[in-house]
Amino acid sequence: MPYQQRKPRSFGAGDRLACPHCSKSMFLSRRSPDAEYERQTFTCPSCDHRIERTVDVDGNTLDKSPR
């Protein structure tokens, strides 16, 4: 069986969210990976607001609303 390279799973790690408080661009500050899902924390460098979300392997958000 030939070697097949797996497609890397990004989990939407390159996403840039707008901060709901100051509208600045937030960055991904923490990733907690799992086999099928990933918990991500985005932090605003201006006001330190944080949003957590759960995404699937394609980067689709599973949460109904950000925290």
Image (cartoon, rainbow, N blue to C red):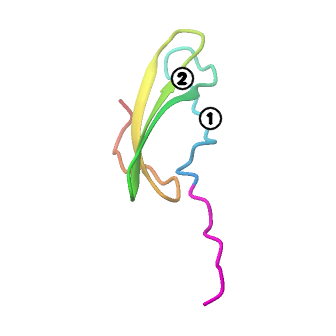
Residue that appears at 61% across and 69% down = 6
x, y (%) of residue 51?
43, 27
Q: Residue at x 39, y 57 (%)?
A: 35
- Which residue is farthest bottom? 1
Q: Residue at x 58, y 43 (%)?
A: 13
Please state, as top left, top right, bottom left or bottom right, where the N terminus lies in the image.
bottom right
- Closer to the camera, 1 or 33? 1
The percent coordinates of residue 22 (x first, y second) are 56, 14
User: What amino acid is labelled 2 in the image?
Assistant: Cys
Residue 2, by quadrant, is: bottom right
Instruction: Give me the C-alpha separation between circle 1 and circle 2.
Output: 9 Å
Q: Amino acid at mark 1?
A: Arg
Mark 1 against mark 2, which lies toward the viewer?
1
Residue 16, disc: 1
Q: Which mark is residue 19?
A: 2
Q: Point out the stretch of residues depicted in magenta.
A: 1-9
Instruction: Place residue 27 in its image quadrant.
Output: top right
Looking at this view, is 28 or 5 the one in front? 5
Magenta stretch: residue 2 in it? yes
Residue found at x 49% / y 22%? 20
Q: Is residue 67 left or right of residue 12?
A: left
